[in-house]
Image: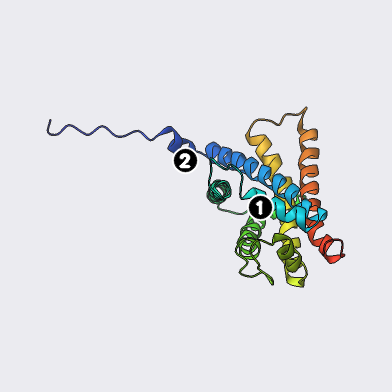
Amino acid sequence: MAGTPLTERRPSTVRLLWQSTLGKKAVMAVTGVMLLLYLIAHMLGNLKIFFGPEDFNGYAHWLRTIGQPVLHHEWFLWIARVVLLASVVLHGVAAYQLSRRDIAARPVRYAHRRARTSYATRTMRWGGVIIALFVVWHLLDLTTGTVNPRGEAGRPYENVVATFSTWYGNVIYVVAMLAVGLHIRHGFWSAAQTLGASSPARDRGLRLLSNGLALILTAGFLAVPLGVMTGLVS
């Protein structure tokens, strides 16, 4: 009937969730947990380099055959890459938008900042930028071989050794892994609060767990370049 206003389409639940501050924090928490699980698996895989080139190269080949014959060669890796990329994008966008909302909510800077704000908290934002830039470098280095001194397909052990035989490869990796450790230390605690896992009775344990995870992952990732630099891996 003429003149009758059209019924407004109601936003979907997913859209309403994404638009809310709580929803964005939940997205950050869930994607953060997914990325943390990937980091743990990736670190454990990296440590196989200490068993020699045959074991490490065999492990790299196995990753490309997961799911066969149901999945074709490297399909599992590509599925994992897409999921990880989506998680990184959602995590980053949610973090940026929450940051903008926080700034908009208090446009005038506080006259007195808290002096005891943790280093991890203060560096969370630029730490994320460092990690994002490192991911690009890491892919160009050990996935495509573009910036790798050796860059030989099918020989990941030799490519890793070549990377950490250069001063710049070590510097880039060490700085990035320290940023990852600080990000995990603060991010795990924030995710626990967002997902409702924190409580006065559990806070101490969760803080110890977040510190422990950050320390173990940082040490685990740094063990590889240190192994190359000391000649333990060659």
Q: Are marks 2 and 1 in contact (CB under 8 Å)?
A: no
Nearest to the observer: residue 64 or residue 110: 64
Give the x, y percent position of residue 170.
76, 66
The spot of residue 168 in percent (x, y) is 73, 71
Q: Which of 206 and 105 is in front in this view?
A: 206
Residue 147, numbered circle: none
| Residue 157 versus residue 90 in the image, above or below | below
**What residue is shown with label 2?**
19
How packed mark 2 is, by other alpha carbons closer than 10 Å (few <14, some 14-19, many 20 or more), is few
Judged left or right of residue 213, residue 35 is left
Q: Residue sitting at 62 percent across and 60 percent down?
A: 143
Name which residue type carries label 1. Answer: His
Q: Position of 149 compared to 225: left or right?
A: left
Amino acid identity at mark 2: Gln
SS type, badge 2: helix
Q: Which of marks 2 and 1 is in front?
A: 1
